[in-house]
Image (cartoon, rainbow, N blue to C red):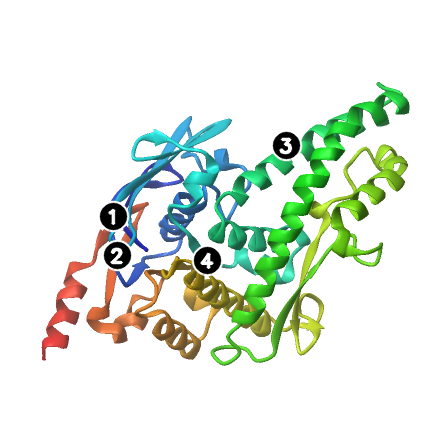
């Protein structure tokens, strides 16, 4: 998988086009110039969402009412494809080769794995971040799962509206039970699909965990919100029972209390939960270990690697770990790194492409590339 180029218009402070190298790409410049914004644009192109915000309209340039990110992707011997995400204040549109595509079909085009300060929420944050990590991985293996998630979220949204109306006294419980029934039926079917997809992906990720590169004794465990409530092997029946017995509680809360949207993932180091007991360094090591396992699982399925994004690498990792990580990725993935310390990467010589970012514009650092190429020839 190779992102050949990317072009951004009105996305944060970005403007212009970059043609990427096929291996290591290093974006350097002062803080606040837009280096991380380019990584966010790549992530957006891959997943049609941001790793920084849930509200994409927040990524619009100040004063703009629309933005676009476009990129050209090559995969093996397949014909190159042009991906585009258009953002407006209240909507987004995904397209492939100029044709609007469903989320499921779009999700099959490009996959990105990211190591950023925001992604550390997978280890130290709330359950939503960990569910998102698992769901992105499951979508990378089975793009149709993206539609399953979208359908489930619509069901939860509609059911929540009905529960809120009842909590506010706008409908009786008898009326509510009749209205909620069809939504619960969909929730059960879709919930089983989500539970199964997540469980399978977590098992594959566990099998692929690389215990040698950064962190020993890392394991993960999917934690169903129904765990301890009955027989998980008959998930649909158990979910149906819990929805029935917790109906009054949901009415009182005015929200959806039962379903896989309440599940979590335990990330363990030596059997202890890193969220509570891990040091900052252990948490970073665990996230890299999970990311590298995700690369391996993806490769096993597709015989290809996703692109890999590393934001503000100097702040997150020490020099030794940076070297080990980039050397591991070399020859496997197309990698994008942001740094404010360009000179720290000259040791990679002609193996890297360098881009200087100034006020959102990125230009290839040809002077440095020429020096590096000359050194390689000598």
Q: Say which quadrant the N terminus sits in.
A: bottom left
What mark, if any, has residue 154 been given in the picture?
A: 3
Residue drawn at the location 52% of the way across and 55% of the way down: 137
What mark, if any, has residue 114 been given in the picture?
A: 4
First-in-chain label (2 vs 1): 1
First-in-chain label (2 vs 3): 3
First-in-chain label (1 vs 3): 1
Q: Which residue is label 2 attached to?
A: 355
Foreground mark, 4 or 2, reads: 4
Q: Does residue 129 appear anywhere in the picture?
A: no
Residue drawn at the location 47% of the way across and 37% of the way down: 103
Q: CB under 8 Å between callouts 2 and 1? A: yes
**Marks 4 and 1, how far apart at CA:** 19 Å
Q: CB under 8 Å between callouts 4 and 1? A: no
Foreground mark, 2 or 1, reads: 1
Classify mark 2: helix, strand or loop: strand
**Marks 1 and 3, how far apart at CA:** 37 Å
């Amino acid at each position: 998988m190779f992102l050949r180029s990317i072009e951004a218009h009105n996305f944060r402070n970005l403007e212009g086009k970059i043609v990427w190298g096929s291996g290591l790409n290093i974006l350097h410049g002062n803080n606040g110039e837009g280096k991380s914004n380019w990584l966010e644009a790549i992530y957006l192109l891959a997943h049609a969402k941001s790793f920084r915000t849930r509200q994409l309209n927040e990524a619009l340039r100040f004063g703009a009412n629309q933005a676009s990110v476009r990129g050209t992707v090559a995969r093996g011997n397949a014909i190159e494809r042009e991906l585009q995400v258009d953002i407006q204040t209240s909507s987004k549109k995904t397209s492939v080769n100029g044709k609007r595509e469903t989320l499921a079909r779009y999700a099959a085009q490009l996959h990105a794995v990211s190591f950023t300060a925001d992604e550390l929420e997978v280890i130290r944050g709330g359950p939503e971040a960990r569910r998102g990590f698992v769901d992105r991985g499951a979508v990378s293996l089975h793009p149709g799962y993206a539609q399953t998630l979208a359908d489930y979220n619509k069901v939860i949204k509609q059911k929540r509206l009905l529960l809120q109306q009842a909590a506010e006294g706008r409908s009786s419980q008898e009326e509510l039970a009749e209205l909620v029934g069809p939504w619960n039926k969909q929730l059960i079917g879709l919930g089983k699909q989500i539970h199964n997809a997540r469980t399978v992906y977590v098992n594959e990720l566990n099998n692929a965990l690389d215990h040698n590169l950064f962190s020993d004794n890392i394991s993960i465990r999917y934690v169903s919100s129904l765990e301890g409530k009955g027989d998980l092997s008959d998930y649909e029946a158990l979910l149906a029972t819990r929805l029935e017995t917790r109906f009054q509680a949901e009415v009182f809360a005015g929200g959806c209390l039962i379903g896989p949207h309440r599940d979590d993932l335990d990330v363990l180091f030596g059997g202890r939960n890193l969220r509570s007991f891990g040091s900052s360094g252990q948490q970073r090591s665990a996230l890299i270990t999970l990311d590298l396992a995700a690369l391996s699982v993806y490769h096993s399925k597709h015989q290809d690697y996703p692109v890999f994004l590393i934001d503000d690498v100097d702040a997150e990792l020490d020099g030794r770990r940076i070297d080990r990580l980039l050397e591991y990725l070399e020859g496997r993935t197309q990698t994008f790194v942001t740094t404010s310390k360009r000179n720290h990467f000259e040791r990679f010589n002609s193996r890297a492409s360098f881009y200087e970012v100034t006020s959102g514009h990125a230009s290839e650092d040809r002077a440095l590339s020429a020096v590096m190429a000359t050194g390689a020839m000598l």
